[in-house]
Every structure is written in structure tokens, then in C-alpha cells.
Image (cartoon, coloured by chain):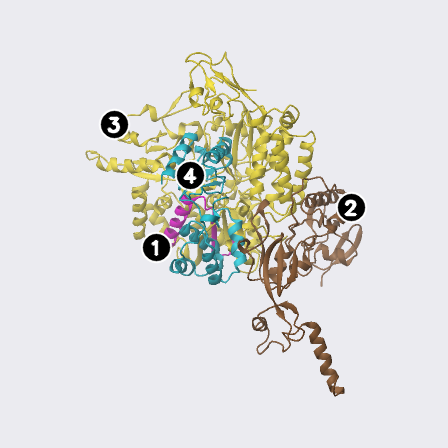
Chain colours: A brown, B yellow, C cyan
């Protein structure tokens, strides 16, 4: 296969066609900061933190590393004064939304950002869109970015508690500023976004230990996505701990009469 | 409207055109009805004239002519057309073949027009056009507004009934398509367009021929898309074309389809243009019924179907990838992809997107050749460009001139300059993505390149003239606010950067500006330009950057002296009546909504500043410039 | 936005009408989603949630995507609109000729901001970014009728008209 000759931060490396700059940089141990990127999802290029300079002949372009596909031999600079200045501004602007985030605070230090430059917007979200994207891909299609412009924010349909949430918690896991909260209370899993209840999912009761463990999922629906004949596992209503004990007991039963 | 309905019905019986030759024969047969010498009363019924009762005037004319006794002479027929482009004088009535021009015609004028002019051949003084020096003009082609233009794209507008395909065919429409289908290969069509060196009229100015060529080289189903989402506030070129000459656009699209190898086209039109939606809908139906669109066009075996799709109110959908998402029935956010839409656009297939005016230029390029087209305009910017001239200028309307004409000629010779003896301050081009150009650059020739050099852009052709009473800081705030609302919100620089710029501009216009504000605005502005995701974002700072570049002292007056010299930013000025200039006509007193002005007739009036709410009604209406801004 | 929610009871949804839009006119094709929503809005003067749920089901598009579209495009409204709609053009030409002051005037007179409806549901004020009638600026559109070269007195007349209906 054809390979590309790329110069990145002075280093001559080779790249595969259509590889992204971010992938190439990571491969070669060059750090490019990102907020809205996850290798599990399509790049959205929303936060613009991964902006780098691309040189082709004399032309200089600003491109986002997360989604720029390399197709020609080019030079890339990931840490120029212009890039640092832009990243500093992004962080300053986002600090006004999410001043408490340790991730942003770390970046602010790295880029010498003035953390109080802009007045506080009293928000808790950096609008990276990861939660909405992961929800669309693996969740119940519960979250989206509603509105536009200044008004854009993570939301459920009609701003009401959603009936579509499956309680998978992917949004909680992926949020870079830890703003999505999930709590299991009294047999229910409650998802909170912007401090507001976004969904409430019933939890399954473990047949063995009586504790609640995971969200109730329509397993026949899930299994229908697999090959024909797939039936829900027999221990679907048993929590992982008890399942392990049950298995252990079964194995033990082969060697000992009683346990 | 009755007359429009008739046109529609009569087309039910129109024949199906089965060959390019049949089109020529059919055109020849139309001469007796649509020829230049047929007595016709033309009335403009475009969006600009409709609010001023144009449709009523047309109906009255039709009724009046039907009832009048012409004693055997030919009764002229009434024709309702699309926008003439001279909207500030609307409703406009023209009498053909003499070419008599009447302006601001009211329903009550109709009997007089029929009796005196149509029957008696006598001119009606009060309906004639007079320029600023009170010179009277009888014929359309003598009026400076029209005389100095070169109307190629706008040729038929205001001449034909947009609801009547026969009228379009009579002027030669679909002739270029016949030529392209019968005697040209796709490669030859593309070559002709490349030779013409026409650049996209939507704003970015990418050479159309190259775009077509690269779309034609792709594999897969290809789509032809027309961007009729004219979102720039203050621009109405595309609206007039869609309303006035829809078949020209359909013809241009069909030629593109032949060149690129597509059989499916879409027109994405703004919901805010209801009349354009009507004209297009009917035009598509008529063209399909006659075999000029749809299956087996003109019997040549070429198929091309066009559908109409409506936007739902989002400026960002003028951006090509956002438009394609919207066409697919999704949210119109620009796609974060470094892949051109000619490779992967609508339905992830190769898509050729051009603006309305670009398609409208194509038929003439095919008929007269790329070399001919190239001979018009400048070396880098060929052909003509349509501008919508608005704001503080005498003659508001559509202006089509060759590229390279100086701004001054458009604004002062064609536009008639700034009214009320006020001074010209700036011209804003390119809509919210453009910039403000000050008086010292009035002599630059209009082209993609020259406007870019002075910090503005050609854009789609909006041209808003601003006089001394317009505050440039407020203009920058207005556009920034517009973009804050219209930004899709997905990328950080555009979303967060614009809010902060608006915040600073709000502060300055409220008298709370800080010394460092212009520099901060420039810092954020450059960042938004370099770091944003789409064309909206990367040009969003232009209004601010260009006003700081050319009008920095006005920012400084606001910040340091807390004054708005133009009298726009309310907290930064007050009003006073100049005793020496005031003649005591009493207009200001009558206009004042809060009774803050007192004074006897023919004696200088006094304005009580405590009561004044600075609505500027007095200032606006004083004919003696006696209300002054302090 | 006070006073709107209180009066916001869902209208009776006629599923035959919805079917004629979704199935007959637009073929249940998801690419026509925006135009279906426009037709639904025309029917009810806003987008009732029940109708959108039905639409989601019919075209097999997740409800959240439909909500996203409804909040993205300016012409859609999830709140009922008033019987009369006054649309102030805030395009550049109209803005320079003072439509900003007209918006303020309406707000001070009837207490609604742009996008809001009076508590008696008689009047909604909307802004539109240019209707393309710049030559006759400032333009206001009242119940789809254009008023060219409008001024405060025209607005006052229209406000009275809206109230009397």
C-alpha cells in the first residue's frame, strides 16, 4: 500500500492514506490535546482544541487533527505560537462555563490561560457533544444537542425525563468534565443532567441476594439483534456477584457433594 | 389572481416538445402573442411591489381594459411580472411597445392610465420618474438606474410573466438546453463553462467549471443542487430571480445535469420566500408537462427531475454541507469533514451545489460561448454580478453590472447617491460574513479579489449603503448578534467567541467600553476566523474586524468620550433643536410620541431633554437638519 | 414566557390529518421530515408533542432527532402561537431603518418579547431575518400580509386590531 511522507513537528514519519493527523501523532508519541474526541466515535471536530498547522508548499492552513485525513505529503506543526494562542483562548472561553473541571484546570496551566478572563456563564458543560453522540451510538437515543447558537445544550426530548434511557451510563463515563450524574436510589437509576432529572430507569432485583443491580432491559429486544435463536441468558436476573458465586458453586458441586 | 390562473390553465394545452427543433418551431409560433411589438401593459408584482397594492393595480387594469371601448383598436393585454428590481419606485407599470415608465402607481391611478395614456397617448406627469434634480424621464431605458446597468441575468425579469412558460420560451429560454442536449458532449459543456471562468455567485467565488469537472469525474449517483437559501439579510437577488424568471434557473440546472451526468436535482429554497416557492412549483410542473424537464427531455433520451425542498429558518443552511444535511431531513449543522461535497455530499454521493445566480448565468454561456462571457468583467472576475442595493440610497433595487465597475458608480450613478443631503459613510457588502467599506475605497473596482483586499467579501451580492447617521459600532453589534443567533453552536470558537464579542460590543454601545476592547475584539475575531469549523464561523468576525480596521476612531469616541456621533447608541448622545435652523414647521412636535417638543408655529421649537426617549422621529423627519445630535 | 404553559393544553390530534401529511403527501420518507413538520405546524400553529410522537413512530426516526430539528430551525415552535402573528423583519435594511425600536415599542406596549405570546393568546411577536423586501424597509408582516415602510402608528393600529379579535 502507498504510504505518505509526513513531517510532524520536525520529525519525518510515514502515514497511511486517510489516516487522521491525531492518529499519526499518537502513533509517534506527539501529544495533541482534545476534549470532544473518543476513538470509539466518529470525530465531531467541535471543541477545536486539536487544531494544528498544515503546510503544503507555501500554503498554511489550520486544520483539526481529529478528523483531517492525510492524503498527500505535508508538513504538520502541532505546537506553534498561533496554535498555542488559539488553544489558550478556547480554554479561557470554556473555563467560563466549567471552572471546576480538573481537566480544564490542567490545560489552563499548560497553556497559560487566564482562568477568569470571561464572566462566568454558570454552566456545567463544555458542549463537546460526546454524551449525545455516545447515546445515539450505544445508548437509548435519549440525549441530543437541542437548540442552536448560544442556546445549544445537552437535552432530552421536550426537556422531559426520557422514557428511552436504558441506564447504560455511557454518557456518564464519557463526559470529560464529569457533569452527568447517575445514582441508584430505591430500585431506580436516576440520570441527572444540568442538575435536572433526565431519566429514571427501573433496576433489576437480584433473585439471589435481593439487591438491585442493573437497569431493566428488554432482553428479548436486545437478543433479537443477534443471530436467530439467541435467547436471554438464564441468569439475567442475577447480579454479577451472585452469578459468580452461583458459578463457583456449580463448579464446586462437581468435586464435592456439599459445600 | 385571475390573469395568473389563466396563464396556468392555458398551459395545460401546450404541446409536449419532442425534439430541439420542435422547441424552435413552438417558439416561432409564440411571436404573435409575446413579440416585442405586441401592446402590453406590464405591472411588477414582485415581493417588493405587492405590499404596495401591485396585485390590485393589475386586477383593476385587467378589468378596466376589458370594459373600456377601444373602437376596434387592439386591446393591450396585462402582464404581471416578477421583480423589476427598482422596488423603491414600486408598483411600476410599463407600457409596451412604447416603453413608457410609470412609478408608484396606486389603484386610483388606473382609470387615468387607461383613459389618458393607453387610449389617448398622453403622458401622466405625476406618475413619471423624476431624478433628484427633478428631471423627468419618460422611457424605462433612459432612467439612469436602468441605463447604466448591463442586464444579462436579469434580462427577462420584469418582462415576462413568471407563471407562464410560453412567455419564457418566447424570449429564448430552454434554447441553450436544446443546444447542450443536441450538439454538445458533457465534456464540451464543462469546457465552455471553464473557458467562461465564471466563479460561484454564492459568495466563495470558486470557479464553477472546475467544480463541475471534479463532480463529473466521481463515481456514483450524482446530484445537482441549487442553493436558493438566500439568508443574507439585505440581499434579494436570488428572490427576484426565482420570482421573476424561474425557468432560466431550471434550464441552468438541467445543463449542469447533462454536463455532470446527473438525473436528479433539488432546489433548496427559503421558507421566507412564499412567492418564489409558488413560481418555482408551477415552473417545474409546466416544464415537466412540456417535456423540458423530467423523462426524455426534448426527445433526446436525457432524464432530469427537479424537486423543491423548503428550509425552515436557519441562516447556516446556506453553508453547503449544512444545506445537504437539511435536504436529507436532518438538523442543518455543517459537517465536520474535510471531504468536498462534489465527492461526498447529499446522501453521501457526489453533489454539485451552485447558487441561483450561477445557474442563471449558464444558459447564456452555452448559447454565446465562454469566450463571449469572459470578455465581460475583469480578468479574474468575469461576467456580470447582480447586487441588491439597499439602505441609505436614493434608488433601492437590483443592479446588474459587469465585474470591475467601481463601487462609486453603483452607489452614486445608478443608485443616485445618499438621500437627504447626508454624507456617505460606508457600504456593507457580503452580508453578515462581509465587511464595511469606507468612502476612501469607493473607487475600487468590484470583484472577488478587490473586495477581499479591503477586508470585505463579494458574498452573494448584498450592498447596503450607510450614511452619516449610522453608527459603525452598532452595525458591528447588529451583525454579531445576528450570527450569535444563527450560529449552529457546535464549535467552540464560533459559539463562545461570538457571545464574548457581542458582550463587548454591547458594553461599548452602552457607554461602558474599556480602552482595551478594540484589541480584545481583534484578538477574539482573528481566533474565530482561524479556528471555526465552517464558512459561517470563519467569516463571522468580518463585520467587527472590518469596522475596527476602517472606523477605529469611532470605537474610540464611544469608549473614551462616551459619545455616539451618529446618534444611534441611546446612552451616548442627546438631542437639541438648533434655534437658527428651525423654521417652526411643527413636524417634529407632531411626530414626537412623548410630547417633549414645544413651540409655536413659525417660531423655533424647544426639545425638553428630560422627556425625550431618543426615538429620533424628530431628527428623521426634520427637513431643515435643525435637530442635532450632541 | 410567563403565562404560556398555563394555557398550554394539547389540541385534539386528528390522525387522519397527520396521515394525509405523513403518508399521502410525503410518503413516510424521512428526507421529507422538515416539510412534514412544517405542514403539521401549519395545521396546529405549533408542533404538538403528541403529533411529533406519532410522526416519530411513522417515519421511524427517534423522537430525540425530531426534537432536535424542532429546536434547531427558527420557524418551528413547540409552544402554541397566538391567533395573530406580527413578524418584524430584522434584516439589515430594516434594522437600519429602525425595526429594533419597533420591537422595543411592542414589548413596552403589550409586554411580549420576540418569540413570545400574550397570555390571552391573541398575539405572538416573531422576528424574521429578512423577508427580501428591503426596498420597502422597514417591513412588518402581520398575519402573512406585508406592511411596507411601516412606522409606529402602523404598529399601533395592528396591535389594536389583534386585540379586538
Q: From where the camera sits, is residue B444 visible?
A: no
Sequence-first disc among 1 and 3: 1
Crowd around label 1: few <14 · some 14–19 · many ≥20 (10 Å): some
Which label lies toward us, 4 or 3?
Answer: 4
The chain to which mark 2 is attached is A
Q: From where the camera sits, is residue B305 visible?
A: yes
B412 sits to left or right of B77: right
> Residue under circle 3?
B120
The chain to which mark 3 is attached is B
- Whether labels 4 and 1 belong to a single chain: the reply is no
Q: Which mark is residue B16?
A: 1
Crowd around label 3: few <14 · some 14–19 · many ≥20 (10 Å): few
Q: Secondary structure at mark 4?
A: strand
Q: Secondary structure at mark 2?
A: helix
> Residue under circle 2?
A109
Of residues A190 and C142, the one nearer the viewer is A190
- Whether labels 1 and 3 belong to a single chain: the reply is yes
- Expressed as whole percent of the image width and height from the top left, the position of residue B158 reads 39, 37
Is-magenta flag for residue B264?
yes
Of residues B93 and B435, the one nearer the viewer is B435
The chain to which mark 1 is attached is B
- Expressed as whole percent of the image width and height from the top left, the position of residue B500 reads 64, 39
The chain to which mark 4 is attached is C
- Expressed as whole percent of the image width and height from the top left, the position of residue A82 reads 73, 42
> Residue under circle 4?
C141
Tell me which segment is drawn in magenta. B260-288
Which label lies toward us, 1 or 3?
Answer: 3
Which label lies toward us, 4 or 1?
Answer: 4
Amino acid at each position: 500500500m502507498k504510504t505518505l511522507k509526513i513531517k510532524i513537528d520536525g520529525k519525518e514519519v510515514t502515514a497511511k492514506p486517510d489516516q487522521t493527523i491525531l492518529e499519526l501523532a499518537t502513533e509517534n508519541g506527539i501529544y495533541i490535546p482534545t476534549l470532544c474526541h473518543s476513538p470509539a466515535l466518529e470525530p465531531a471536530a467541535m471543541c477545536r482544541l486539536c487544531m494544528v498547522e498544515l503546510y503544503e508548499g507555501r500554503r498554511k492552513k489550520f486544520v483539526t487533527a481529529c478528523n483531517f485525513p492525510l492524503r498527500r505529503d505535508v508538513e504538520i506543526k502541532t505546537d506553534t505560537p498561533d496554535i498555542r494562542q488559539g488553544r489558550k483562548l478556547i480554554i479561557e472561553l470554556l473555563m467560563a462555563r466549567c471552572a471546576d473541571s480538573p481537566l480544564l484546570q490542567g490545560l489552563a496551566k499548560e497553556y497559560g490561560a487566564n482562568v477568569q478572563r470571561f464572566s462566568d456563564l454558570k454552566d456545567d458543560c463544555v458542549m463537546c457533544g460526546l454524551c449525545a453522540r455516545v447515546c445515539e451510538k450505544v445508548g437509548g437515543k435519549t440525549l441530543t444537542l437541542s437548540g442552536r447558537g448560544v442556546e445549544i445544550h445537552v437535552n432530552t426530548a421536550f426537556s422531559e425525563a426520557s422514557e428511552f434511557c436504558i441506564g447504560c451510563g455511557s454518557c456518564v463515563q464519557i463526559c470529560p468534565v464529569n457533569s452527568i450524574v447517575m445514582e441508584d436510589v430505591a430500585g431506580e437509576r436516576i440520570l441527572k443532567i444540568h442538575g435536572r432529572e433526565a431519566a429514571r430507569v427501573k433496576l433489576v432485583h437480584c433473585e439471589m441476594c435481593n439487591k438491585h443491580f442493573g437497569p431493566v432491559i428488554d432482553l428479548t429486544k436486545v437478543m433479537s439483534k443477534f443471530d436467530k435463536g439467541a435467547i436471554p441468558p438464564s441468569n439475567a436476573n442475577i447480579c454479577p456477584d451472585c452469578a459468580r458465586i452461583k458459578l463457583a458453586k456449580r463448579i464446586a458441586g462437581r468435586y464435592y457433594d456439599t459445600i | 389572481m385571475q390573469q395568473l390562473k389563466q396563464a396556468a390553465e392555458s398551459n395545460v394545452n401546450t404541446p409536449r416538445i419532442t425534439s430541439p427543433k420542435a422547441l424552435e418551431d413552438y417558439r416561432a409560433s409564440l411571436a404573435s402573442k409575446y413579440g416585442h411589438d405586441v401592446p402590453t401593459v406590464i405591472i411588477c408584482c414582485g415581493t417588493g411591489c405587492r405590499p404596495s397594492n401591485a396585485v390590485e393595480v393589475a386586477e383593476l387594469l385587467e378589468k378596466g381594459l376589458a370594459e373600456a371601448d377601444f373602437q376596434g383598436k387592439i386591446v393591450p393585454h396585462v402582464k404581471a411580472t416578477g421583480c423589476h428590481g427598482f422596488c423603491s419606485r414600486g408598483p411600476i407599470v410599463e407600457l409596451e411597445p412604447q416603453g413608457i415608465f410609470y412609478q408608484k402607481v396606486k389603484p386610483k391611478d388606473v382609470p387615468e392610465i387607461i383613459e389618458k395614456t393607453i387610449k389617448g397617448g398622453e403622458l401622466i406627469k405625476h406618475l413619471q420618474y423624476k431624478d433628484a434634480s427633478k428631471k423627468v424621464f419618460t422611457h424605462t431605458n433612459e432612467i439612469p438606474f436602468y441605463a447604466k446597468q448591463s442586464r444579462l441575468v436579469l434580462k427577462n425579469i420584469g418582462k415576462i410573466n413568471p407563471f407562464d412558460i410560453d412567455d419564457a420560451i418566447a424570449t429564448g429560454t430552454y434554447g441553450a438546453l436544446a443546444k447542450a442536449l443536441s450538439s454538445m458532449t458533457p465534456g464540451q459543456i464543462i469546457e465552455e463553462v471553464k473557458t467562461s471562468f465564471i466563479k460561484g455567485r454564492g459568495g466563495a467565488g470558486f470557479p464553477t467549471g472546475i467544480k463541475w469537472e471534479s463532480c463529473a469525474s466521481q463515481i456514483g449517483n450524482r446530484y445537482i443542487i441549487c442553493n436558493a437559501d438566500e439568508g443574507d439579510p439585505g440581499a434579494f437577488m436570488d428572490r427576484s430571480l426565482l420570482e421573476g424568471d424561474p425557468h432560466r434557473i431550471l434550464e441552468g440546472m438541467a445543463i449542469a445535469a447533462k454536463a455532470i451526468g446527473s438525473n436528479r436535482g433539488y432546489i433548496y429554497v427559503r421558507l421566507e420566500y412564499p412567492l418564489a416557492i409558488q413560481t418555482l412549483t408551477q415552473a417545474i410542473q409546466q416544464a415537466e408537462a412540456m417535456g423540458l424537464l423530467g423523462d426524455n427531455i426534448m426527445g433526446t433520451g436525457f432524464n432530469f427531475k427537479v424537486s423543491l425542498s423548503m428550509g425552515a429558518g436557519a441562516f447556516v443552511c446556506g453553508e453547503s454541507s449544512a444545506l445537504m444535511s437539511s435536504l436529507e431531513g436532518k438538523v442543518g449543522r455543517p459537517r465536520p469533514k474535510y471531504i468536498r461535497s462534489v465527492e461526498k455530499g447529499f446522501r453521501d454521493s457526489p453533489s454539485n451545489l451552485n447558487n441561483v445566480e450561477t445557474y442563471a448565468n449558464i444558459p447564456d454561456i452555452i448559447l454565446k460561448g465562454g469566450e463571449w462571457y469572459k470578455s465581460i468583467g475583469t480578468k479574474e472576475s468575469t461576467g456580470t454580478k447582480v447586487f441588491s442595493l439597499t439602505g441609505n440610497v436614493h434608488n433601492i433595487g437590483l443592479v446588474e453590472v459587469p465585474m470591475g465597475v467601481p463601487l462609486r458608480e453603483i452607489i452614486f450613478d445608478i443608485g443616485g447617491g445618499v438621500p437627504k443631503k447626508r454624507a456617505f459613510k460606508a457600504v456593507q457588502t457580503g452580508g453578515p460574513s462581509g465587511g464595511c467599506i469606507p468612502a476612501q475605497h469607493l473607487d475600487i473596482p468590484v470583484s472577488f479579489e478587490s473586495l477581499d483586499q479591503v477586508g470585505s467579501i463579494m458574498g452573494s451580492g448584498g450592498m447596503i449603503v450607510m450614511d452619516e447617521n449610522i453608527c459603525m459600532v452598532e452595525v458591528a453589534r447588529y451583525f454579531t448578534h445576528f450570527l450569535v443567533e444563527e450560529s449552529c453552536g457546535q464549535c467552540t470558537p464560533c459559539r463562545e467567541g461570538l457571545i464574548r464579542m457581542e458582550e463587548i460590543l454591547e458594553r461599548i454601545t452602552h457607554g461602558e467600553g474599556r480602552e482595551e476592547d478594540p484589541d480584545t475584539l481583534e484578538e477574539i475575531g482573528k481566533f474565530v476566523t482561524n479556528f471555526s469549523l465552517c464558512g459561517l464561523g470563519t467569516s463571522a468576525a468580518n463585520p467587527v474586524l472590518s469596522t475596527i480596521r476602517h472606523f477605529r476612531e469611532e470605537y474610540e469616541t464611544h469608549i473614551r468620550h462616551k459619545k455616539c456621533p451618529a446618534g444611534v447608541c441611546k446612552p451616548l448622545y442627546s438631542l437639541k433643536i438648533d434655534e437658527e435652523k428651525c423654521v417652526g414647521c411643527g413636524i417634529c412636535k407632531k411626530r414626537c410620541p412623548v410630547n417633549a417638543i414645544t413651540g409655536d408655529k413659525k417660531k423655533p421649537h424647544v426639545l425638553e431633554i428630560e422627556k425625550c426617549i431618543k426615538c429620533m422621529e424628530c431628527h428623521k423627519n426634520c427637513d431643515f437638519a435643525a435637530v442635532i445630535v450632541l | 414566557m410567563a403565562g404560556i404553559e398555563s394555557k398550554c393544553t394539547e389540541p385534539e390530534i386528528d390522525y387522519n390529518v397527520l396521515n394525509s401529511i405523513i403518508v399521502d403527501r410525503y410518503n413516510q420518507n424521512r428526507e421529507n421530515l422538515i416539510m412534514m413538520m412544517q405542514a403539521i405546524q401549519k395545521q396546529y400553529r405549533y408542533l404538538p408533542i403528541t403529533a411529533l410522537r406519532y410522526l416519530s413512530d411513522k417515519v421511524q426516526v427517534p423522537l430525540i432527532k425530531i426534537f432536535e430539528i424542532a429546536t434547531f430551525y427558527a420557524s418551528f415552535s413547540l409552544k402554541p402561537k397566538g391567533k395573530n402573528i406580527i413578524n418584524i423583519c430584522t434584516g439589515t435594511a430594516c434594522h437600519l431603518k429602525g425595526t429594533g425600536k419597533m420591537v422595543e415599542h411592542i414589548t413596552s406596549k403589550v409586554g411580549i418579547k420576540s418569540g413570545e405570546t400574550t397570555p390571552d393568546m391573541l398575539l405572538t411577536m416573531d422576528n424574521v431575518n429578512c423577508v427580501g423586501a428591503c426596498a420597502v424597509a422597514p417591513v412588518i408582516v402581520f398575519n402573512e400580509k406585508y406592511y411596507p415602510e411601516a412606522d409606529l402608528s402602523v404598529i399601533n393600529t395592528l396591535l389594536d386590531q389583534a386585540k379586538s379579535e
